[in-house]
Image (spheres, grey):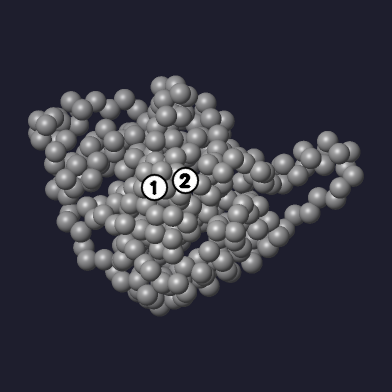
């Protein structure tokens, strides 16, 4: 999932690019000074489609225009403008527009360990360990308005990183007490958990289904069915999801797209591009954008230093 503002395009800061882009292109905001948070904004998502996927981060999104279907685990929702969606780490989900209808949204991704630490500091839990939160969907005009305001602050190049982080903490401090801890989900059998752990560690390498079957001591058909029952993905889809995450991290760290593809285990850049776009509804090039400072420096050089460079 990801993001948009009803008032039109907002300038982005951190490592996202400030430019007039076609409405269908997502805008990503990141700031190296705030590695625990990322924002995505989409102004026209009619052509945006997500395959089922999962994030390592806790995420929260706002539908700012139109309507869409939202699937989280085995639950399905119809969500419309004014609705907030909340997604726990590792929960398989997908949010897609209704055919031909307008759709604009914002999506905030927050490091789960950082958020668990904040919950502990707020006195909501005793230890800074992650616990899944409920609900999946929230309909609160006040919280929605606060979320859109937070997104506008993050996308605005003027406020400092400290001011943006303070706004983020204030927003979360208000909503976290409203979120309940989820009931414990079914725990996967030890053999399936071992397969998932193996894929986590070796997804960038060559992992055959036969090797996974030997590890779990089951037939291919049984492994695929049982793995999907607990993890909401087949072993192959699970591995691809993990590879895309590796590529995403490499791009955030500044790797060229071709290097990110190799680092994450894809045989070629084209395959990486296809899978990245299928799961994240953005191309690696759209995700890996130069920082505002770099772009401003380049502009200043072109103009012979005529304009002073302002940095928030």
Tell me which residue sits at (34%, 40%) in the image: 51
Tell me which residue sits at (65%, 52%) in the image: 11
Q: Is residue 65 left or right of residue 27?
A: left
- Residue 289 on image: x %, y %: 60, 40
Q: Quadrant of residue 155?
A: bottom right
Q: Nearer the viewer, residue 291 or 50?
A: 50
Res 97 label: 1
Please tell me whether mark 2 sits on a helix, a strand or a loop.
loop
- Residue 301 on image: x %, y %: 83, 38
Whether residue 108 is visible, yes or no, is no
Q: CA distance from mark 2 to mark 1?
A: 7 Å
Q: Earlier in the sequence, mark 2 or mark 1?
A: 2
Whether residue 102 is visible, yes or no, is yes
Question: Circle 2 is placed at which residue position?
Answer: 45
Above-or-below relation of 268 to 263: above
Q: Residues within 10 Å of mark 2 (few under 14, many from 20)?
A: many
Please tell me whether mark 1 sits on a helix, a strand or a loop.
strand
Tell me which residue sits at (29%, 69%) in the image: 181
Above-or-below relation of 170 to 51: below
Label 2–label 1 contact, CB within 8 A: yes
Looking at this view, name the residue that lies furthest to the top. Answer: 268
């Amino acid at each position: 999932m990801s993001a948009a503002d009803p008032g039109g395009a907002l300038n982005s800061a951190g490592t996202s690019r400030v430019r007039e882009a076609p409405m269908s292109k997502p805008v990503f905001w990141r700031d190296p000074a705030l590695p625990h948070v990322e924002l995505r904004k989409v102004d026209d998502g009619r052509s945006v489609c997500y395959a089922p996927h999962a994030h390592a981060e806790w995420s929260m999104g706002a539908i700012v225009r139109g309507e869409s279907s939202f699937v989280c685990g085995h639950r399905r929702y119809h969500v419309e403008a004014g609705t907030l969606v909340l997604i726990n780490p590792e929960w398989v989900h997908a949010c897609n527009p209704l055919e031909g209808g307008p759709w604009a949204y914002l999506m905030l991704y927050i490091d789960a360990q950082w958020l668990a630490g904040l919950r502990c500091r707020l006195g909501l839990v005793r230890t800074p360990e992650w616990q899944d939160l409920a609900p999946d969907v929230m309909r609160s005009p006040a919280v929605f308005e606060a979320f859109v305001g937070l997104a506008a602050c993050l996308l605005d190049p003027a406020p400092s990183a400290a001011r943006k982080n303070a706004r983020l903490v204030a927003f979360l401090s208000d909503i976290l007490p409203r979120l309940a801890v989820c009931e414990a989900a079914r725990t996967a059998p030890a053999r399936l958990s071992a397969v998932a752990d193996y894929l986590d560690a070796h997804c960038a390498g060559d992992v055959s289904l036969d090797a996974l079957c030997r590890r779990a001591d089951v037939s291919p058909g049984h492994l695929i069915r049982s793995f999907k029952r607990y993890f909401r993905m087949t072993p192959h889809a699970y591995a691809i999801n993990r590879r895309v995450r590796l590529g995403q991290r490499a791009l955030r760290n500044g790797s060229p797209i071709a290097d990110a593809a190799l680092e994450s285990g894809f045989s070629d850049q084209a395959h990486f591009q296809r899978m990245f776009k299928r799961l994240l509804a953005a191309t690696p090039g759209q995700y890996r954008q130069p920082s505002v400072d770099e772009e401003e420096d380049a502009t200043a050089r072109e103009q012979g230093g005529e304009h002073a460079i302002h940095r928030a």
